[in-house]
Image: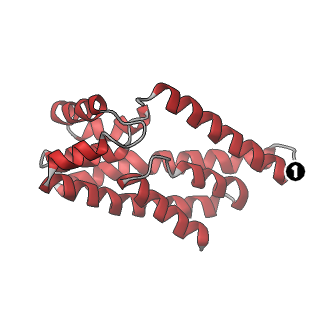
Amino acid sequence: MRARTAAALWGFSEATVFFLVPDVILTYVGAFRGLRAGLVASGFALAGALIGGTVTYGLAAHMPDAVMAWLARVPAISPEMVARVQGDIRASGLSAMVLGPLSGTPYKIYAAAAGAQGVPYPLFLVASVLARLPRFAGLTAIAAWLAPRIPAPRRYLQITWLAIWLAFYAFYFSVMPR
């Protein structure tokens, strides 16, 4: 139950203010609690992301300049990135939203751009599911498959999991703005 709640809160937080993806907790649950628990947690992370994305979408629909300016202050987000996402949504619509987060561009910017540009809410929700769930479930499934195949004590695997995420974010923050 704690993993579900944590995944939902993490999904919500990352879609609004937080800058670490829910994949962190989802890979942990998948690796150490199994595929079923990981996929359930992925569903909860998706639900949290949809609620958080809806908040971001709604706020941007009513005060786009303030939301875009605020997003540009979040770690690893620059004003140029916010402007690029706005242009991508204008040019490519929701396909940009589905594919964009795979490139390391935060989902929350796409949610804000969709709200600011008046993308119909039902289409935004469908694109949000397509943007979030495959990655959540995919990384969770990989972790659930891989962890039992590594012949090492659980503690060593936990340290390895943490080292992988620390290395990932060290690289990510070194190449992203600020």
Residue in the image at 69% along x and 59% along y: 34
Total marks drawn? 1
Tell me if I can see residue 1 in this picture: yes
Q: Up-down: is 67 above or below 46?
A: above
Crowd around label 1: few <14 · some 14–19 · many ≥20 (10 Å): few
Tell me if I can see residue 44 in this picture: no
Q: x and y percent of residue 75 in the render?
A: 42, 40
Figure coloring:
secondary structure
Horizontal placement of 51 versus 171: left or right?
Answer: left
Q: Quadrant of the C terminus?
A: top left
Horizontal placement of 77 versus 95: left or right?
Answer: right
Q: Nearer the viewer, residue 126 or 53?
A: 53
- Residue ID for mark 1: 153
Quarter of image, res 103: top left
Residue in the image at 50% along x and 50% along y: 136
Residue in the image at 52% along x and 27% along y: 174
Tag 1's secondary structure? loop
Horizontal placement of 103 versus 51: left or right?
Answer: right
Q: Nearer the viewer, residue 113 or 36?
A: 113
Q: Up-down: is 14 above or below 94?
A: below
Quarter of image, res 101: top left
Q: Nearer the viewer, residue 11 or 166?
A: 166
Residue in the image at 21% along x and 36% along y: 86
Q: x and y percent of residue 167 in the render?
A: 64, 34
Q: x and y percent of residue 119 in the render?
A: 15, 48
Q: Quadrant of the N terminus?
A: bottom right
Quarter of image, res 107: top left
Q: Up-down: is 178 above or below 9?
A: above
Q: Residue furthest bottom?
A: 1
Q: Amino acid at mark 1?
A: Pro
Horizontal placement of 162 versus 98: left or right?
Answer: right
Q: x and y percent of residue 175 in the render?
A: 48, 25
